[in-house]
Image (spheres, coloured by chain):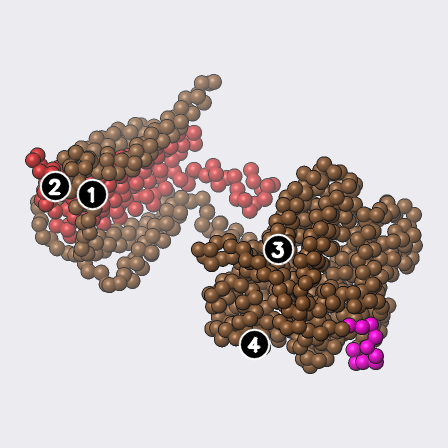
Chain colours: A red, B brown
Amino acid sequence: MNLIYALAIALLTGCGVHMLLSRHVVRIILGVSLLSAAVNLVIFYSGRISSTVPPVIEPGSSALSEAAANPLPQALILTAIVIGFALIAFAAALALQAQRSIGTLDNAGLDVAESLGTPFDGPEKRR
Amino acid sequence: MPLSAILWISFLGSALARPLALRLGQRAGWVLAILPASLFGLLWIAGSGLEGAGAIVEEVAWVPSLGITLDLRLDGFSRLFGLMITGIGTLVTIYAGAYFADKPAHKGASFLALILLFMSAMLGTVLSDSLIGLYVFWELTSLVSFLLIGFDSYKASARKAALQSLIVTAGGGLALFAGILLIGMELGSFSLSNAMQNSAALAASPWCGTIMVLVLLGAFTKSAQVPFHFWLPNAMEAPTPASAYLHSATMVKLGVYLLARFDLAFAQVPAFGTALIVFGGLTVLVASVRALSRTGYKAVLAQSTVSSLGVLVLLIGLEGPVAATATVGFMLAHALYKATLFFCAGTAIHATGRTSLVEINGLRRALPVTAVAAALAAVAMAGLPPTFSFIAKEYLFEAQLESGSGWFALVALVLGSAVFVAIAGIVSLRPFFLGRSREGAVHHGETPGLFLGPAVLATLGLLLGLLPGLAVAPLLGPAASALVGQALPVSPALWHGLTPMLGLSALAVLLGLALYLLWPRLLARLAHLDWLDRLLGDAGYNHAFEGVLALARRCTLVLQNGDQRRYTATVVGATLLVTAVGLVLAAPPLAIDLSLEGLRLAPAVVVGLMVAAGFAATRMRSLPAALVAVGIVGFGSALLFLLNGAPDLAMTQFSVEALLVVILAALLLQLPIRPPSTRSAGERRVDALLAGGFGLVTFAALAAMTAAPLDLRLTEFFAARSYPEAFGRNVVNVILVDFRAIDTLGEIAVVAFAAMAVWGLLARRAKGKEPT
């Protein structure tokens, strides 16, 4: 099963990177979303995906049973899911604002900063 | 009085100098001069008991855990330096007070404070026995020198010269620091006197050559030796009192000081002496040629200073005790006459508003005392009797003849001395005594503050020549002894009889006279030789400087080209490369886990669906369709969590994914649904290659990860402690809100900040709309 998981995660990562390399902002955001799903699975996988028993201590016992799933990666992923959500929500708001004020979400057209010129141009060349 | 107290007084005094000077107004120079004058007195008393090569040592702890001290040490040599620093410092302070009399008060006050701070740093350098302390003070002098050269910060040339001197001297300082660290590593101590006594251990060290080169770099940059000679003449952008003090009498001699100190430490490394003779001699020759091709008053003096520094470096390279005497003698003589000449130049430039020697004439009527001082200093510079310089020069030739180090050093010394004679005439006879100053050319006469310094120094130069005994017992003897490490008999006299040294002196004077008479014609020739200026000037430095800027520009234009796709591709490519190299070079070689053990149908189907959706997302032209595909991946991962014992994750992922799809769908409502692709076919191929490579590396890393044993210590800790310590049965929950509660707080903060940022972004739109 490990082989299948590793293969699937690797393929999802590749898909995410491919979308990240796009010039369209929404595609980049979708790429980030794909990548963060893949990264969450990497963390899950690193703690070994072997058990189906949730890591909850049985009533009457004071320690987790040996059969339960590894709780540590789950805790890390929970944090990562929420942070990933905040990141994408922020990026979406940024994209919305860019679309409204500039009128395009294609990176080839988003050149407000570049049209200011470079520091090497000297003051007279900068607009 | 302990040596540390002298340093404390010096630094505290210079910290108070600026507010005090602002309050004192015109008298500031005279009152503040009390500080260096009293330090002069304290140093004189502190060192008066020194005999032979003896020394006063004071241990000062600094960072005991690293074995770093601020130990101080006063011997004859550092005392001579200290007296020159404080003595000339006194006169410079008085002179600077008068020099800035017609400038705004705060300028003069800042200048005086910097001069005194510089003096403190110089004193710290020569009193340090700890090499680390020496380095700290050494760099402090570079920094203050930067501030003083760039003092007229409104002038672009001053800023450029200041930066140049800082880059050269502080850069050399870094080399020196590396050398010092190596010395500490090899000898086990950062003590300068320890290094001087352990020359055998140093010579035996495998790092000896490296240490020597690094120390030479530090000294040559500071003392403006070839090929770093170019910064000192440019440093003449500084106000003249600073030039007189830093760039002729004291700071630039620090390199010489360092070399003289290390002469004993490198006593068993013959290459050290040879390097000094070669570079010192070259410096003398280069600076002599350049001195004769300049017309600026300060420029000519600066070039001759470079030449004098070359002479000193060469002298240190010579063998034998006479060389030590000649070094300290010439050092003192040079400080006396060169500071005087800078003072006179400053007064002449200040009074006429002109800087070129060709334009300044016949000032003897307007500035009589200055003119006499200039004349005396010129006699000294020419090395004529009865000045102290004559004695020093006799020693110089004697040291050369005695060491028998070949014709190169001799030629350099005779030629250098001849050029000194010519320059002495050029900088004193012409501006003060020849010709007649034009009507109205002189804006003001001399004030006591302006002529006290040159008068005192020029008189001293004469007095020490007439009564050489005055300087020997208290100053030169102990200084020369400290250099060779044993008591040295020094008995100078004006008249030695008819010796070879006298013959060389006479030859130098004759040559110098000829050069002086030929100077106008020589100047016309040399001034037009552009290639000479390029070869001997700072063209190399400028080339390197502009090369670095051009490289930075090119890198920026390539890397910062405004195309985000290229940035991402660069980052992805670099990550790919580093990870791949790491995987290949991993030791021991990685095992790969390719097991299908524990295969279950449900998760396998989910995983297959996710991969299909992922590929679909990359292929779809329509954005809503791609969003649906990405959503499928998200919900798929939630299902995977649910199927593998992580219901908490599944719940969170479901709700977050639902929210995300809603938010992104809302975004898509505002956009064209099928944007055209702006990736070219070539770019697509590159992207596919990068994405494929990334997937491959990820796969290899994951397969290698599960082949390695899993460290379960943390898991076991949480499994065992969750209930007894945090009273929670859901271990994931307990980890989040108890064991890693601060982390979770941070996560909540991130979400809150994101919400605030989103609100700010969208509110801006609402506000902008209101007026319309």
Numbered circle sitting on residue A72: 1
Query: Disc 4 marks which residue?
Result: B268
**Earlier-in-chain disc, 2 versus 1:** 2
Residue B440 shown left or right of residue B260 in the figure: right
Mark 4 and mark 2 in contact? Answer it, CB < 8 Å: no
Both marks 4 and 2 on one chain: no
Numbered circle sitting on residue A19: none
- The residue drawn where x is 47% and y is 55% is B64
Q: Secondary structure at mark 2?
A: loop
Query: Disc 3 marks which residue?
Result: B3
Segment colored magenta: B492-501
**Disc 3 residue type (three-letter):** Leu
Note whether B296 is above or below B758 in the view shown: below
Q: From where the camera sits, is residue B544 visible? A: no
- The residue drawn where x is 83% and y is 51% is B451
Q: Secondary structure at mark 4?
A: loop
Query: Disc 2 marks which residue?
Result: A64
State the image coordinates of residue B164 (x, y, percent, origin top left): 62, 55
- The residue drawn where x is 56% and y is 55% is B136
Is A63 included in the stretch rendered in magenta? no
Both marks 3 and 1 on one chain: no
Whole-number angstrom distance, CA of label 1 to CA of label 4: 65 Å
State the image coordinates of residue A67 (x, y, percent, origin top left): 9, 44
